[in-house]
Image (cartoon, rainbow, N blue to C red):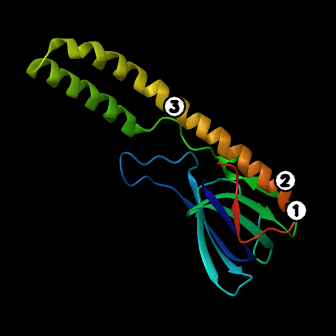
Amino acid sequence: MRKFWYITGELAEVQRYINVPMRWCEQYPARERREFWIAADDGRDIKLVVHSRVMPVRRGHQINVLLLGDWVIGLANLTTGRQVNFVSEDPPLLLHKCDALAVLGILTGGLATAVAWDVRSLVLTVPVALMYLPLRVLGRWLATCRLRCQVSHWLASSAREPRSREVALLA
């Protein structure tokens, strides 16, 4: 079961940057990155980064931020009542540039096996190479849909009930 957790506090600062991928495999659906500092209710200052075009908060607003590890996936502005599901607003990409390298690796490995061992290995290699990309995209799409629903559920219930420090959502 994955653990979601959240931070409550006052937004101390927010900065907007334009994303420039540093490596050939890095891809961001949003070309903007927001870095913001939260003065948490327990006295800590916490820096968070979100890749999104949407940021419905200003300095001084009280906010709840939902995180999955270090990934900011939801935000509720307690001052204005606005909420944003970052998984819905800027969903992760379903197809990565690195996936083409994986298909190339499958085909190269199958061809090397066919030459060195048995030509019949191509009977498995070609279907696996052809099905890799569609199955990878389908898996990522299903995971994104599930996460989007979990974040929407948290945002809908965040204003109604007090929450504990760690929240275990359905896995």
Helix, strand or loop at mark 1:
loop
Question: Where in the figure is residue 121, as x and y percent of width and height?
Answer: 22, 17
Mark number displayed over residue 137: 3
Q: Earlier in the sequence, mark 3 or mark 2?
A: 3
In the rendered image, the residue lying farthest to the front is: 1
Amino acid type at image mark 3: Val
In the rendered image, the residue lying farthest to the bottom is: 43
Amino acid type at image mark 2: Ala
Image marks 1 and 2: residues in contact by CB distance under 8 Å: yes
Residue drawn at x 51%, y 55% as measured from the top left: 19
Residue drawn at x 52%, y 48% as measured from the top left: 28
Question: Where in the figure is residue 17, as x and y percent of width and height?
Answer: 56, 62
Q: Is residue 171 left or right of residue 56?
A: left
Alpha carbon separation for disc pair 3 and 2: 28 Å
Mark number displayed over residue 156: 2
Amino acid type at image mark 1: Ala
Residue drawn at x 48%, y 27% as measured from the top left: 135
**Residue 84's image quarter?**
bottom right
Alpha carbon separation for disc pair 1 and 2: 7 Å
Helix, strand or loop at mark 2:
helix
Alpha carbon separation for disc pair 3 and 1: 34 Å
The residue tagged 1 is 159
Q: Is residue 63 left or right of residue 116?
A: right
Residue drawn at x 78%, y 55% as measured from the top left: 154
